[in-house]
Each structure stands twice: as structure tokens, then as C-alpha cells.
Image (cartoon, rainbow, N blue to C red):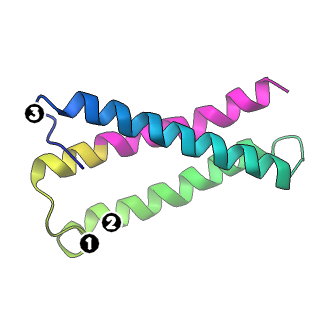
Amino acid sequence: MLTDPAEEAFLPNFLLLGAGTALVLCLVFFLYQKLDQSQFAVIKLGIWGSAVGLLMDTISLWNLPLIFPALSKGQVIAFTIWMVCAYCMYLLIPLILSHKK
């Protein structure tokens, strides 16, 4: 559940959502490494995935009343905060995985 950043429950919810996002991304990148074993496969996936995702999120935020009509202003801010952190993970996790090789 998206919690307004002004609420006390925001940080624990955000950290839990961030941890879940990191786990899912690690799993996706791990599986993708098995599928494409070229040298920079996960880095390319991170870059292309971020580019496509950012474009899609831009469109969804632009059309907020159509796509997320029930979200409050605080929830939109919380979604945007999570989204920025998720894309940071989307770019950094592949670098970490590639560095470990």
C-alpha cells in the first residue's frame, strides 16, 4: 500500500517495498544472465529496461487521472519516490552483478 510520505508508516512501508523490489530485480537479472551469457547482458538489460520503464512511467504520471484516479497527492509522491529508487536499483544491481564475475 502506498503511504503518504508525511505519515509515520511511510518509512517502514517504503523500506519493505524497496527490499521486495531489490529481491525481484536480483531474481530477474539472475535469470536473464542464464538466458543471455554475453559479457554485458545484464547491464544492457538494466539500461534498456530503465529507458523503457521511465518512458512508461512518464506517460502514466502524465495521465495520472486516467491511470491512477484513486491515488491521493501523497500517494503519487510516494509512488514517484519508490519509482526513482527502483530505477536506481535497476541500474546499479547489474553493475554489481557484472563486477562479481
Q: Which mark is residue 7?
A: 3
Q: Find the distance from the CA under tag 1 to the CA under tag 2.
A: 6 Å
The residue identified by callout 2 is 60
> Residue at point 65% right, 45% down?
27
**Is 89 in the magenta?**
yes
Measured as percent of width and height from the top left, residue 75 is found at: 17, 49
First in sequence, mark 1 or 2: give its number: 2
Q: Reply yes or no: does residue 75 show up in magenta.
A: no
Tell whether label 2 touches label 1 (CB within 8 Å).
yes
Write down the region rendered in magenta: 81-101
Q: Is residue 88 above or below residue 42?
A: above
Q: Mark 3 or mark 1, which is nearer the start of the sequence?
A: 3
Under mark 3, the amino acid is Glu
Whether residue 61 is situated above or below residue 32 in the rendered picture: below
**Mark 3 to mark 2 CA distance (whole Å):** 24 Å
The label number, if any, that marks residue 67 in the structure image: 1
Mark in the foreground, 1 or 3: 3
Q: Amino acid at mark 2?
A: Ser
